[in-house]
Image (cartoon, rainbow, N blue to C red):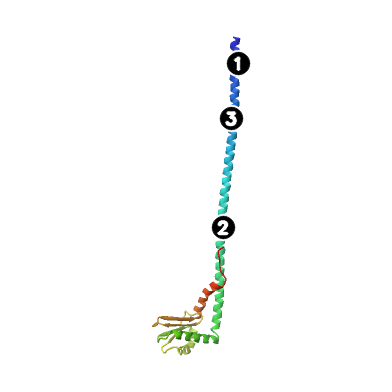
Amino acid sequence: MPDTVSKTDNFLKAIEKYAEEQRGKLRSEAEEFQERELNTAEEEGLKEAYDLVQKEMADINAEISGQISKAESDFRKRIFERRREIEDEVFDKAKQRLIEFTKTDKYASLLLDSAKEISSVLKSEDIVLYVRECDLRFEKRLKELFPSGCEIAASDDIMIGGITGVSRSMGLIADETLDTKLSYQRDWFHEHSGLTVVEK
């Protein structure tokens, strides 16, 4: 019987030892698994954090770019508006100076010189000369420069001064108004004023 007990004890000890080894092995594997999982989770967490930072940076850059683009557009718009204001101021002053000029004796000479220019182009019997209402006072002197039958009429389209000649039979209009000459100066002003807006 003692041999049987001894064998049983040895067998139980062997089982316990094997069980202890297996427990140790399982514990070690569990720790390794846990460490691997923690490392994986940490790496994934870092990657997610990195991706989030990159996305936030891209969003911020896009927002800043949009704000810069809008600011540049608003600035260009303000510059264009200011340029137009300056241009309007310049031409309003020029218009007022021309209106003042039409009140001088030199204006009468200019008007008659303009009529001579028109008479050198329009040589028909059906000429109509258009002037401002207040310039009808020059009617007699103007008619002397044209063939008989020439008519003088007031035009609401002439605001500053000058004269326009029309010949229906020739199909021609000769515009020597100060209004038109001033409007032509806008193109010159655009080219030579130096008030330009450029893209950078």
| Label number found at residue 60 | none
The amino acid on which the numbered mark 2 sits, given as a three-letter code, is: Gln
Decide which of tag 3 and tag 2 comes sooner along the chain: 3
Instruction: Confirm or deny contact between disc 1 and disc 3 (CB under 8 A).
Output: no
Above or below residue 166? Residue 4 is above
Disc 3/disc 2 C-alpha distance (Å): 56 Å
Q: Which residue is mark 3?
A: 29
Q: Residues within 10 Å of mark 3 (few under 14, many from 20)?
A: few
Q: Is residue 130 above or below residue 58?
A: below
Identify the secondary structure beneath mark 2: helix
Mark with earlier residue (1, 2): 1
**Does 87 appear above or below 109?**
above
Q: Is residue 98 visible?
A: yes
Identity, as a three-letter code, of the amino acid under mark 1: Asn
Specify whether residue 153 is in view.
no
Query: Which residue does the numbered mark 2 point to in the structure image?
Result: 67
**Disc 2 packing (10 Å; few <14; some 14–19; many ≥20):** few
Q: Nearer the viewer, mark 3 or mark 2?
A: 3
Q: Residue at x 59, y 32 (%)?
A: 32
Which SS class for mark 3?
A: helix
